[in-house]
């Protein structure tokens, strides 16, 4: 079938993207779903820094590629072997397909699925190959999702069925921003009722972590970013303190406000320097968690002695270190009860044709979550 999609033609093209147009919006071909796959009509897809990092070359991927890893839509057709979804079902996309039988999947850690990571790195489907093409040549899928399109063929193992009454533009955020940010709060065990917490980097993922920390009952929530406007929003969402990351006295101020440092510092800026700052503001015996994705060449400088002498913990978190089939319904339950107001993260609704301008806005820090909404 013919679909409209935003195709990344070249990595590292300079901005402004509204002029250089790294993403070309046009018609391409989509093959039918194979065994274990599902055809989804996409309703909403979020613009994320992970997509931007592919565009600017921080995280190279094979091109041409349809970007987009966060989204939600409606099932139109199921492939052979898919028995638990039917046309009309609403689904959220997960950016790591879980095979269900590799070592990590077998121990309840689907975010670390080995075949899923391999297929994502190649820009292919979990079952192998691509379902997208243009003029007879293959077009790659970002993380097996490729949500910047009117339709997508996606592995059943990358989909979570949700109730139909939830607005799909809100549901779209569950698959990345909320799963990664709030998931790191709930699944890592470092944020407890009454704890002192810091969140470094206030994009959609970081602000979702602020919401998660509030829901988890953290007593002190310190928000840190380079932009004053994001600090204000963080306070509105429940942060008790807010500081500019550029403040030369940042670490000292956080330690003073938290009586010696935070119990848990979560870094989402995708910067080695930001992670070093998060580690420095963590108390003795505390935990520093990073879910940011810096350039692969970035190097972290911390004292190994502090890990032992201060019994510190430094942990990575990918996909919220959770189980999407379990966590997304839980987060939706919190949303229904008003404890996870995800809709407050949405700052812009755009069309697919405005995608290059949207990434300019994201690069400038003028947006939290922009959502492409596909209208009938």
Image: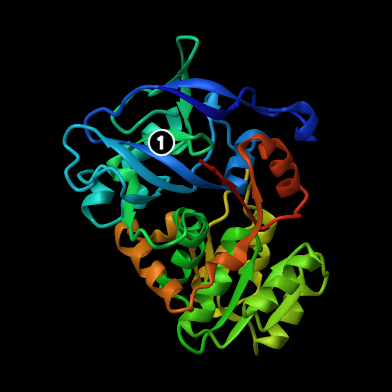
Picture coordinates of residue 307 (x, y %)?
A: 52, 69
Asked if residue 285 shows in the view, the reply is no
Q: Is residue 361 above or below residue 200?
A: above
Front-most of 10 and 314? 10
Q: Is residue 283 above or below residue 319?
A: below
Q: Residue at x 72, y 28 (%)?
A: 21
User: Is 25 situated left or right of 133 in this image?
Assistant: right
Display colour scheme: rainbow
Q: Position of residue 266 (x, y in %)?
A: 56, 67
**Is residue 61 in view?**
yes
Disc 1 crowd rating (10 Å Cα; few below 14, some 14-19, many 20+) is many
Q: Quick one: quadrant of the N terminus?
A: top left
| Residue pictured at 75% horizontal, 79% vertical | 252
Judged from the image, the secondary structure of the residue bearing numbered disc 1 is helix
Q: Residue furthest front?
A: 376
* Residue at the (21%, 30%) spot, across then down: 35
Residue behind mark 1: 144
Q: Quadrant of residue 211?
A: bottom right
Classify 193 as above or below 375: below
Q: Position of residue 30 (x, y in %)?
A: 41, 23
Q: Position of residue 283 (x, y in %)?
A: 58, 80
């Amino acid at each position: 079938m013919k679909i409209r999609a935003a195709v990344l033609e070249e990595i590292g093209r300079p901005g402004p993207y509204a002029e250089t147009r790294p993403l070309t919006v046009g018609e391409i071909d989509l093959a039918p779903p194979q065994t274990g796959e599902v055809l989804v009509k996409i309703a909403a897809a979020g613009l994320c820094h992970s997509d931007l990092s592919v565009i600017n070359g921080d995280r190279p991927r094979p091109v041409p590629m349809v970007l987009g890893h966060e989204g939600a839509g409606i099932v139109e057709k199921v492939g052979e072997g898919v028995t638990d979804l039917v046309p009309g079902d609403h689904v959220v996309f997960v950016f790591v397909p879980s095979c269900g039988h590799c070592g990590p999947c077998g121990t309840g850690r689907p975010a670390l699925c080995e075949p899923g990571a391999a297929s994502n790195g190649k820009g292919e489907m979990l079952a192998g190959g691509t379902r997208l093409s243009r003029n007879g040549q293959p077009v790659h899928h970002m993380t097996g999702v490729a949500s910047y399109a009117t339709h997508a063929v996606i592995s059943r193992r990358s989909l979570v069925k949700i109730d139909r009454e939830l607005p799909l533009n809100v549901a779209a955020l569950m698959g990345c921003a909320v799963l990664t940010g709030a998931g790191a709060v709930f699944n890592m065990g470092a944020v407890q009722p009454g704890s002192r917490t810091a969140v470094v980097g206030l994009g959609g993922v970081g602000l979702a972590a602020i919401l998660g920390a509030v829901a988890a009952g953290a007593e002190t929530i310190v928000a840190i970013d380079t932009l004053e406007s994001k600090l204000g929003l963080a306070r509105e969402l429940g942060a008790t303190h807010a500081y500019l990351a550029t403040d030369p006295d940042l670490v000292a101020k956080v330690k003073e406000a938290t009586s010696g440092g935070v119990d848990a510092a979560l870094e989402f800026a995708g910067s080695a320097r930001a992670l070093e700052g998060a580690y420095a503001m963590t108390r003795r015996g505390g935990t520093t968690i990073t879910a940011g994705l810096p350039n692969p060449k970035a190097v972290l400088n911390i004292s190994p002695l502090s890990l032992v002498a201060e019994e510190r913990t430094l942990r990575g978190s990918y996909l919220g270190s959770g189980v999407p089939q379990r966590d997304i319904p839980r987060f939706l339950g919190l949303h229904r009860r008003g404890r996870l107001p995800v809709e407050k993260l949405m700052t812009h609704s755009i069309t697919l044709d405005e995608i290059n301008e949207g990434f300019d806005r994201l690069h400038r820090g003028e947006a939290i979550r922009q959502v492409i909404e596909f209208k009938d």
